[in-house]
Each structure stands twice: as structure tokens, then as C-alpha cells.
Image (cartoon, rainbow, N blue to C red):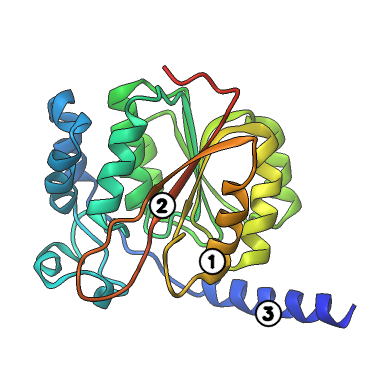
Amino acid sequence: MVLTSSIHSVQEAAWKLLKGLRPQRIDLSRIHYVRQADIDQLNNQQSLIELLPQLGLNNEGLDEFPLFLHQYCGKGLFIWQFPVQFAAYLAFLGHLKVNSYLELGIRHGGSYVATVEILDRFNPLEFAIGIDIIPCPSMTEYAQLNSRSRFFCINSQSPAFLDLLHQITPVDLVFIDSHHEESQCRREFSLLSPVSNMIAFHDIANISCPGIAVIWNEIKRSPEWTCYEFVDQYPGNGPFMGIGLMIKNNRIIT
């Protein structure tokens, strides 16, 4: 009981800190790079590696990014991903005909918007939903540009989140990138795995997030899922970030 209470206190402190953060308003005009791109460009990993910096990268945790990418940081969509990983992941998704999307933990919203825009080019989404515990000012504007996108400012550990899941599930693809702590990530996975065909985790290779790697390595041993990793690194530091994608074996891959 003492241990459980201690864990709960740590989570409450972390959520309080997160609620005090203020996301940047992102430059949604950059989505024209995706909407005007040839579909072959979006299917090609190397072309996506070159495109993603043009969309704009985040400047938080700048030391994680190689110097040659710094000129793209703090601009555009503020995407908090390594292009070398994100491009491989998105190109792979293009072959899966994703029909609905949910992202937990969207921060400024840039990675969410980029994913939705690219998925939509491959196969029109029925809906896309972003969730974060902190407000995301650009999501109202993005909903005007994409009427199938909705944002909910709720805690994924709350009854409100459970109510939302009952309304929207099943979901074809979920991306979990919320509070990078093992117990919360484990609970999110346990809630979403029965009602999702595919689930992706961020930071499976991040030296700062060992709890995510613990869960990911457990899932890789499960006979229920086929797992893929997108963990290429830039030389000189890390490892950082990393995306793991699991696909239910009964989901037909076309």
C-alpha cells in the first residue's frame, strides 16, 4: 500500500508539472508540403527523410538532434522525432492502409499532424484523434483544415479517457507517446491493446526512458503481435527516441 501510494504521488507530481507546460502554436501552413507531394515521394523513405525537416522540428531536447538539423528546429510543425526513424515508420505505414488513428501525448501537435496528413494521403482516414493532458492551441485550427481530426484535453489515466475509448473504439492504429513512465505506459497499453489493431510506442530506444523499453521487450515475446522497430540513430550521441510498431497477427496486412 505504501509503494502504491508513493507511485501515485510521483504520478500526480508529474501530471502537475505537465499541466504547467505551454505548447507552441505550430505553423500549419507547412502541411502543404505533404498535400502537394507526389505519393511516390511519401512512399519513399529517403524522400521522407528529406521532407520531414522542411515540415519543421522541435527545439526541446536540442542536444539530441545532430547539428545539421538544428537549422530546422524551433520552426514549422515542431515535430519531435528523428527524421531517420520517423520516415522509415511512416513509409512502412503507407503499405498498411490505416483507416483510423489515435495519438496519446501530442505536445505541440506537430508529429500528430504530420502523421495524420501522410496517412490520409495513403488511405483516407475515417477519423483521427489527438489526446494530451495539456491544451494544444493549434488543434482547433487544424480541425478547420481537417474536419476528421479531433483533440481532447484529458488525462489518459482518468475516467473521462475510458468514456472516450468506449465511444471511438475500435481504432486501427494507436501511437503512445505520453508520460514516459513504465506504469502509465503499461496501463495505456492494457486499455488499448484489446481494441486496437496496431499500437506504436515512442522512445523504445531512448536511454532516458528505460521503462518503455521494458514494456516493448515484453511485447516482442508475445505470440499475439508481430513487431517492427525503427531505431536508426545519428552518430555521436544517444541512443535516443526510437519507434516500435506492433501489429496484431489477425490484422490482415495488404
Which residue is tagged 1?
180
In the image, 183: left or right of 35? Answer: right
- Secondary structure under tag 2 reads strand
CA gap, disc 1 to disc 3? 13 Å
Residue 23 in the image: state x and y as whole percent.
Answer: 38, 64
The tag on residue 243 is: 2
Give the quadrant of the N terminus.
bottom right
Mark 2: give few (<14), some (14-19) or many (20+) Cα within 10 Å.
many
Residue drawn at 62 percent across, 66 percent down: 182
Residue 206 in the image: state x and y as whole percent.
Answer: 42, 68
Q: Are marks 2 and 1 in contact (CB under 8 Å)?
A: no
Determine which quarter of the picture holds residue 154: bottom right
Give whichever of discs 1 and 3 has the lower sequence position. Answer: 3
In the image, 70: left or right of 180? Answer: left
Give whichever of discs 2 and 1 has the lower sequence position. Answer: 1
Residue 110 in the image: state x and y as whole percent.
Answer: 32, 52
Give whichever of discs 2 and 3 has the lower sequence position. Answer: 3
CA gap, disc 2 to disc 1? 13 Å
Question: Looking at numbered disc 2 in the image, what kind of residue is underneath it?
Answer: Ile
Mark 3: give few (<14), some (14-19) or many (20+) Cα within 10 Å.
few
Determine which quarter of the picture holds residue 96: top left
Q: Nearer the viewer, mark 2 or mark 3?
A: 2
Residue drawn at 27 percent across, 55 percent down: 26
Q: Is residue 6 visible?
A: yes
Question: Looking at numbered disc 1 in the image, what kind of residue is underneath it?
Answer: His
Q: Is residue 9 above or below residue 149?
A: below
Q: Is residue 70 above or below residue 146?
A: below
Q: Is residue 145 visible?
A: no
- Secondary structure under tag 3 reads helix
Query: In this orientation, which residue lies closer to the viewer: 153 or 79?
Result: 79
Which residue is tagged 3?
10
